[in-house]
Image (cartoon, rainbow, N blue to C red):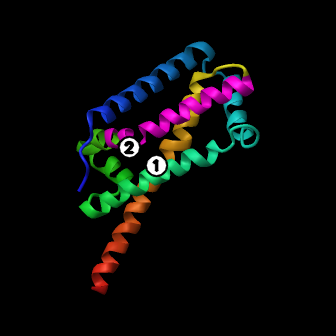
Amino acid sequence: MTQPVTRSQVLLARLVLALIIMFTIAGLLLYGFSAEARARIWYNLVGRQDGPMVFRYFLQPTMGAIAAWRAGLVDARTGRSPFLWGAITEPAERRARFDEALVATSRIILLGLVMDIIYQAIVLDYFFPGEAVIFALALAFVPYVILRGLFARAARWWFGRQKDLA
C-alpha cells in the first residue's frame, strides 16, 4: 500500500523542478553548450573523483538507491510494472510515474544541488549552474530510475519464493 503524498512533498518537488529548470536556463544563457563547455563538464565529471567533498559520489547514489529500494518494494507488493518499463510502455502513466519519482528523489536532488554549489564555491571559485544540475541528476535521479525496477523485480521474486515455501 502506498503512502499518500503530502502537500509539503509536492511543494518541495515543484521547488526542485523549478530550480532545475532555472539552473539549466541560466547555465545555457551564461555559458552556452559549446565544445569548451562540454569539455569542462566532462573533465569535471571525471576529474572530481578525488579531493574535497568526494563523499558525495557515494552519498547521493546511496540515498537514491535507498529511495529506489523503498519504492521498488511498494511496486512489488502492489503488483505494478517495473518503474522504467512502465513509464516507457504505458503512456497514460508516464506523467504520474515521473511525478512519483520526482517526489521520491526531490530531497536527494536538492541536497545534490546544494553540495555542488558548495563544492564549486570552495574549489572552483565559480558557479556553473548547468553543471550543478547535471551532477545532481546523474548522482541521484539516474541511480533511482535504474535501481527501482531492479529492486522491484528482486522483491517480486523474493515474495513469490516466500509463497512457494509456505
Q: Are marks 2 and 1 in contact (CB under 8 Å)?
A: yes
According to the image, label 2 marks what residue? 104
Residue shown at 31%/52% (left/top)?
A: 86
Could you say whether the residue bearing mark 1 is in a helix, strand or loop? helix
Classify mark 1: residues with Cα within 10 Å, few (<14), some (14-19) or many (20+): many
Q: Is residue 114 left or right of residue 157?
A: right
Q: Residues within 10 Å of mark 2 (few under 14, many from 20)?
A: many
What's the amino acid at mark 1? Tyr
Mark number for residue 144? Answer: 1
141 versus 84 height, above or below: above
Main secondary structure found in the magenta portion: helix
142 to the left or right of 41: left
The quadrant holding residue 115 is top right
65 or 142, which is in the foreground? 65
Residue drawn at x 42%, y 29% as measured from the top left: 16
Image: 18 above or below 76: above
- The percent position of residue 14, horizontal first and vertical second, equals 35, 28
Q: Residue at x 41, y 68 (%)?
A: 154
Q: Decide which of 69, 80 is in the foreground and name it.
A: 69
In the picture, which quadrant includes the N terminus? bottom left
Answer with mark 2 or mark 1, whichever residue precedes in sequence. 2
Give the magenta range: 99-124
